Image (cartoon, rainbow, N blue to C red):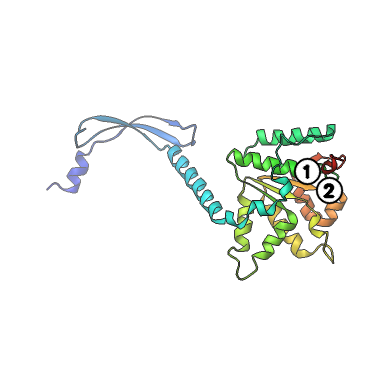
Amino acid sequence: MKGIQELLTNFPTPVILNTYQCEGCSEEVSVTEMTIAGGPDKGKIERFYLGCKCEDIVLAEKALENDKKARMNRTKDIFDQNSLVNKSLLKATLENYLPPNQELHEAKQELLNFVNEFNPKEGKNLLLVGTYGTGKSHLSYAAAKELIEKGYSALFLSVPKLLTKIKDTYNPNSKFSENDLLEFVAMVDLLVLDDLGAEYTNAKNGPDNWTWTKLFEVIDSRAGKHTIYTTNLSSSELESKVNARNFSRIMDDTEVVPMNGKDYRKKSF
């Protein structure tokens, strides 16, 4: 039986032909030739590219994507989307929104561009702001539906219902934890937070620290991702409702889309 030293001595020595920097992974790659020592291809010279990490990067990205899908599947039952959206919105599309004035026509075009140029790796925020009934919820829900049809993940929530959902997780019989819910909200490709500021409409004592804190957690978790906000409030009204810190977060890298006009829901009159 051959000793280890003899085996190592007879093992073919690889020959490095040249090296270069891979454009894909930026690693230094050695182009190496080696003679196969045994088996049916014994004596055959094979060429190897050692040091390239491209395949590892692709595998890692696939693993992360699969993990993301698995986590979303585990938590998507938290939200029954149909139960959280007003029935009047379920049939809303970008096509069936008929803007009655130029400002609303430009708003519709802005949402069309948002959907057509959507890139989950380059977050962009929109704040649809204007008078009641001009179609802010219609357009934002329609944009979310369009993106779901394209294979992206999207979630449409009124802010009051989101806060109610969070409170529901405090029930000891809840199937989900607050962390489950907030993780799902943080990871979707697009989050629509509808009717911002309305969470205080029926509040007896006005804004409270718990609401402000939860809003901050949600908004902060969306940094670098796509979020659409809608509100009927002016900038000063919204800031006083959500507090200065949350308002600053909302406006960070956010494009304001004005939507003023007659009540769209009363157009038949």
Asked if residue 206 is positioned above or below residue 252 in the image, the reply reads below
Q: Residues within 10 Å of mark 2 (few under 14, many from 20)?
A: many
At 71% from the left and 49% from the top, the residue drawn is 87
Tag 1 near tag 2, CB within 8 Å: yes
Q: Secondary structure at mark 2?
A: loop
- Three-letter amino acid code at the position of disc 1: Lys
- Three-letter amino acid code at the position of disc 2: Asn
At 17% from the left and 44% from the top, the residue drawn is 6
Q: Which residue is mark 1?
A: 136
Q: Which residue is mark 2?
A: 232
Q: Position of residue 156 (x, y in %)?
A: 68, 49
Q: Residues within 10 Å of mark 1 (few under 14, many from 20)?
A: many
Tell me which corner region of the image, top left, top right, bottom left or bottom right, holds residue 59.
Answer: top left
Residue 121 visible in the snapshot: no
Q: Earlier in the sequence, mark 1 or mark 2?
A: 1
Considering depth in this image, is 200 or 6 the residue closer to the camera? Answer: 200
Asked if residue 176 is positioned above or below residue 219 in the image, the reply reads below
Q: Relative to residue 12, is residue 121 drawn left or right?
A: right
* Residue reaching furthest to the bottom: 172
Q: Quadrant of the C terminus?
A: top right
Residue 104 visible in the snapshot: yes
